[in-house]
Image (tube, rainbow, N blue to C red):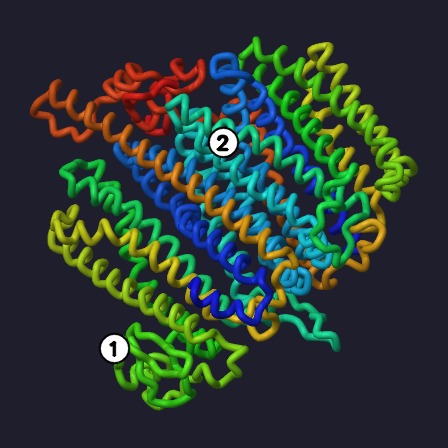
Amino acid sequence: MLSTAVHLAADTPAQLLPSRELMAFTLASHILLVPFGVALPLITLVMHYRGLRRGDQVAMKLARRWSAVMAVQFAIGVVTGTVLSFEFGLLWPGMMGRWGDVFGLGFGVEAWAFFLEAIMIAIYLYGWRRLKPWPHFWLAVPLPLTAMMGAFGIIAANSWMNTPQGFSLDSQGNPTDVDVRKAVFTPIFGTEYWHFVVAMFLTAGYVVAGVYAVGWLRGRRDRYHKLGFMVPFTIAAILTPIQFFLGDSAARSVFHKQPVKFAAMEIVWKTDTHVPEYLFGRLHSDGSISGGIKIPQLDSILAGFKPDTKVTGLTSVPAENRPTAAEATLVHFCFDLMATIGSVLVLLALWYAWLWWRRRDMPENRWFLRCASLAGVACLVTVECGWIATEVGRQPWIVYNHMRVSEAVTQTGAGGLWAMLAVVVVVYIAVIGSFLGILLKMRTRWRVADEADAASATALEPEADTPYGPRHAADAATAAAPSGGGPESGSSKGSSGGGR
Amino acid sequence: MMADVIAWVLVVVIAAYACGGGTDYGAGFWDLLAGGADRGKRPRWLIDHAMAPVWEVNNVWLIFVLVLMWTGFPTMFQAVFTALWLPLVLAAVGTVLRGAGFALRKPSRRLARRRVYGAVFAVASLLTPFFLGSVLGGVASGRVQVGTPPTAHVWANPTSILAGLLAIAATAFLGAVFLVADARRFGADDLIDYFRLRALLAFGAVVVLAAIALPVTHDDASYVWHGMTRGLGLLMVILAACSGVLTVVLLLRRAHRWSRHTAVATVALAVIAWGFAQRPYLLPSTLTVADGAGAAHTLRWLGIVTIIAVVLVGPGLVLVYRLDTKGELEPLTDSDTGAAGLPGDNV
């Protein structure tokens, strides 16, 4: 990435490189939180519903704990997202100045969807103690919809940058005759949107399930870990094959709507039929390819189902209008890594289906659980890869074929931007590091409490098969520890939640 | 016509952010001044409890401001973000530190960590409104034009500095008035007088700063100065002043029921006065609303989106503020999630 950008910097404004790095860094950080912002509410609500419906205290405990995680995670997501809004102006004022009124409306939709989400999440997270159980649940039910609505706005804007339409240009090249509906529903929008949304849900599912798979592997084989694994993993496993087809159709719509980007994704140098597929490999600036596994004909077949499908090559446009060889290699690598991990995840989902069909219970195969605990991390990698493939593949354009990144960049000097990058990197590392530290601390607290419960339950009734202790034991354990709440926190113990 | 409507929507949303976000910044300001860990324990506890459920909602107004700017008035957005680059960067970084500091402080159980997160939150609560205020001052003083390069004088000038300080004082005032009501709601009687005194002091600071601003901005921001001293601008200034005085009277008579509303009216009317004073300019006195407006079709849709937002978000907003002020919203405690204490916990 860096070398690519250095290479580019030769004939571009000095502030372009730090601006791109800053945008890349802040977006790469934020996008890791997005799956949880979009999908954790749904997963929590499924667990919450189960708890309420069946009076299942273990499910309720999981839902409450996930809410506690959500409270911190949502806040970090809000602030890292706000930074991105600022950066549109701070880094790319040229794009917003000329095109803001053409494609900005998607953000308007996103803003009110996000507003609703913030309102409902506040009611949900802070409603556990005082609201009645079922109204509390139902007030949160629209949350996943607002999250998807927010994603609608963001993806509408991004897909417009990839396949801009809904305007015509006047004699000075400025957009006129804006048609908002066309600008929101651009050709690439549908496939990009569903591919993205499903990615968010399955990533969150695999990450959450992975936490409990690790716990199970470490010998904590109780109902708590079983539920914590199976609910999110099942959601993710159902979505995985769907995502496989969505990803495939997304790639094909790139082939049709952004042929040069597709050429970068598949490192196709010259327009041709019977194009081979390279698994990984490097593209050099003379068009030669080194490394990688070559499969004859396959790229043409994947793009158009026939070996004689014509695939546009990078050289179909002048060098200054396409990604550089280094950029194309990066895009190709990310695309292939995403496709590879996606395919492996399909196998994992099938494995899960097989194990479920055989036993109808928590899979206990250690190798399966080892793979399952890695699935979440792998998904986060694919999220980054997919995003790099979209964004770097669009280079050198910020608005595909209409405005270059170098035309949109701010006038601020490169020095100031490098300084800002340094500050932002330090701040983000501190914030995200502390965030992860807090999550680990929360996990430890819960584990210690659960182990104390289990011990006291065994001491009380040796034969009982209860995987969790009676409620008063938990209260005793926390009452003994210094409590962190305010003056009133002692009075309302045990009155919480909707389980009763 | 539609451009004017959207411009007014922008002013109203800025006013909403000044009131909603302002209250949060103010709470952070008092967190900063609450003293050491022992002395500041009670006020900080109240600030934590009062802010927690609503601060994210309040933060979204800012995103609305940005979206309305770049979609409705892209030229103005470009000019402002080019010329006022540095204060906007600092405000953005401040927003991150503030939100993260606040969110991370609550689940921390060690005093040393809480101190660090709390300090980050509180200092950022001071700096962010200052820089946002100075941006507003830079625009109001007419120093931002289309194509103005990012130089220091655009935001390091008398009007900007005064606007930044006024923003801090106004948020401190709002924060203290709200915390008086919150102290009543949570039954923390000792904190009612604590924040009452601070609300009065903050209002004093607002009056002093306004008195300094009056002569200083006469030449430095003459267009807006003249707009605020005549016509509807003046009327709004007078109404804002009346609301402020009424708030003081209510505070002095310990009639805390309505003081929040009058405090919000004070700040909102002041922002609206600025809106009237700056008519018909987005950037006085070079770019008018009509000239800076985006495509007509987009503005119409922006109007529709705004109406949908009002219809959908309005009831939700009323619900969340109602639940919050009735004390129905409480954070999950350790006993709710079944969390144990760990060695080293000391909070």
Residue A60 shows in this picture: no
Do badges 2 and 1 share one subunit?
no
Badge 2: residue crowd in 10 Å (few <14, some 14–19, many ≥20): many
Is B259 placed left or right of A280 in the picture? right
Q: Mark 1 lies on which chain?
A: A
Vertical comparison of B197 with A449: above or below: above
Image quadrant in which the N terminus of chain B is located: bottom right
Q: Look at the picture and state if A231 lies above or below B18.
A: below
Going by the numbered disc 2, the residue's amino acid type is: Phe
Q: Is mark 2 on a helix, strand or loop?
A: helix
Tag nearer the camera, 2 or 1: 1
Residue on which disc 1 sits: A293
Q: Does residue B65 appear in this view?
A: yes
Dot 1 amino acid type = Ile
Chain letter of the residue carrying label 2: B
In front of the other: B93 or B332: B93
The residue that appears at 60% across and 46% down in the rendered structure is B89
Q: In which quarter of the image is the C terminus of chain B?
A: top left
Q: Report the residue at 26% width, 66% height from top.
A: A343
